[in-house]
Image (cartoon, helix red, strand yellow):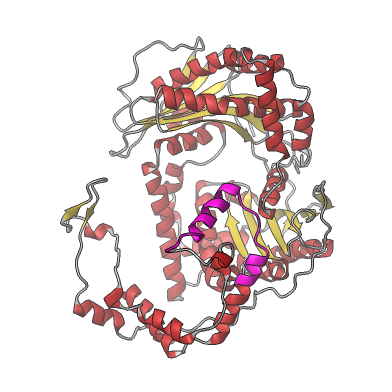
Amino acid sequence: DEVMNTIFTYISMVKNENYPEWIFDECKKINNIDFKFKESSKPIKHVSRVSEHMSPTTGYDIKHILSGAYVHEEFDREHINAITELLCPDNMIVFHASKSFEGHTDCTDPWYGTQYSVSPISDETITLWTAPSAYKSLIHLPAVNQFIPTKFDILGTKSEEPSYPILLRDEPKSQIWYKLDDSFMYPKGNFLFQVMTPVFQQTPLAVVLGQLFIRILEEDLSEITYNASVAGSNFVLDSPNDGIHIYVYGYTESLCKLADIVFSYLTSFTIDTTDEKRVKIYHSQKEKLLRKYENFARSQAYQVAQYAFQGCVNSRFTIAQRMEVFDQITPQALQDFANHVFDVTRVQSLIHGNISKETAISVNDLLLSHLKSDALTKMPLGRIIQLPTPDTRCVVYEEEQIDPEAVNSAIYYYYQLGCRSDELDTLTELYGHIISEPAFDELRTKQQLGYIVWATVRTISCTKGIAIVIQSPSHDPVYLQYRSYEFLDSFVDTLRNLTDEQFAAHVDGLITIKQQKYRELVKESNFYWAEIVGCRSSFDKDKVMIERLKTLTKESLVNFAENIVRNMGYIVVRVFANGGLDKRTDEPNPSPVKELVLQSIPEREAWKKTRDYLPNPSPHCVNKQPTAAE
């Protein structure tokens, strides 16, 4: 009722203000800019969108098929008023979903069994909704948007052979990568920052406080940065294990202004327990985070398998460990965390787009001036457990879903291939390119193992791997594993039996993919960023791979595929449906490899302590790689 009352109070306020024309002019200006500098999209998405615009009932005039969603031709106050008059309780349907309705419904959806009710809106409710809101004094039209760009000068020159990022600075406190756009020629840019801090991975409590810190920051910034998002500039905050990542995207003219706001909020975080609104935000975000952890048990089986796999090969705190410390989270604990999270940091940045070198350096220094940190000298890079090889025992980790409604099972079947190199990257990518379609055809289409089936290449902390993921409503994970092994084993002969023409076609297909140009500036930025935060910076890896593919032989790929099945260490995560742990397939394992089966997190963690970590061979790492003992 409070939400609906606020909505109708706002509608009433808009009517009383008589629809100021300057708001229309702002919308027109923003849409004209967006259309003029709209980046390319995938052809299939473009065709789908244009076909919708051609609809005789819901589409646009022929002259506006491409621009219809962006066109504001003339200001018509009477037309706007006619539309606004339709926004009333008499012309409305409300969908209200809540657990509070459980047991109070009288209808059942025939497809999913969802319980629901349909009822008219009473006169008393309409009166309540349309009465003056308690928040009336706080409701107003938006202020003039200061983020709408007015300068569209292009700094770079288009090149058929785009350049790669260059390193402008490499110092104890920061590293700056920079690339002036030479592909898209739009007045846009991207700021990407990695603020490395060891605090985020020290304890389960630190992990939870870090995530809560980010959630509240995003809530704080949502109102003040709304105008920026309307005008085409946005920010994203993320909290992986290495600290905080800050991404700022948009038009060049607005980027520094938006970045400064984000930096300021990041380093002036406070939880004032005397501020009722502040405390309400704190409790709301804390509750949402706890609910997110609790709901993970209801995730899809394949997602549970993926998460369990990460727990098997990485050093990270489990969701259970995080939930155990929730009673230690207080406003004061969060404030203490915020006060010290940036005591020691190292900043890596990528400044990419229609941006000068001087701006790249100044915005990086702006962040450093807000952080006021000492230099971080040691920061463990991402690392992965070295799996045992088949001559000892490979590993199986089993888990049963606790959700009583979980009827699907899943596997995550991963082979560890070794540390990244140009040769291994090329072989792995070609193997993954060729196996993808046959894996889907055999395991899903022919054997009908499940709707979710894929084979994929994984790169984790500079270590290459191949994974098969399957979710099934009809087979247990042991059965899925055995069928997957049989497929991988037979795939060696599939490769061996390829004709020279077929092999060449696969190679040419991968080369074509690697030669494709980016359709969006942000896609290009993300490619460079993955290399930078992985501390490898192999920006030309696609070009190197193409040259290697031209000389790669079928024999070398067959030997590679055979080596995977015969000699590479693997781990299989088996996720059973609820109650399915004791109803497993009773058949011999087709693989000759002996397996160590782990069935609990304590068993898994004890096993991990017996294993070494693979090195992270990154040329730009700021510290030595920790040993297993460390």
Query: Is residue 467 within the magenta segment?
Result: no
Which region shows up in magenta?
31-57
**Location of residue 188 (image quadrant):** bottom right
Q: Nearer the viewer, residue 274 or 15?
A: 15
Q: Residue at x 30, y 23 (%)?
A: 582
Relative side of 339 to 409, left or right? right
Where the N terminus falls, by quadrant?
bottom left
Q: Could one spot residue 113 in this view of the protein? A: yes
The rendered magenta stretch, by its main secondary structure, is classed as: helix
Give the percent coordinates (x, y) of residue 563. Answer: 63, 15
Q: Residue at x 47, y 18 (%)?
A: 596
Q: Is residue 324 above or below residue 250?
A: above
Q: Is residue 177 above or below residue 573?
A: below
Q: Residue at x 42, y 22 (%)?
A: 446
Total marks shown come to 0
Where the C terminus falls, by quadrant?
top right
Q: Is residue 10 above or below residue 347?
A: below
Q: Is residue 589 above or below residue 223?
A: above
Give the percent coordinates (x, y) of residue 259. Answer: 67, 66
Relative side of 80 to 186, left or right? left
Query: Is residue 36 within the magenta segment?
Result: yes
**Location of residue 35 (image quadrant):** bottom right
Give the percent coordinates (x, y) of residue 383. Answer: 64, 35
Q: Nearer the viewer, residue 557 or 592?
A: 557
Q: Could one spot residue 611 in this view of the protein? A: no
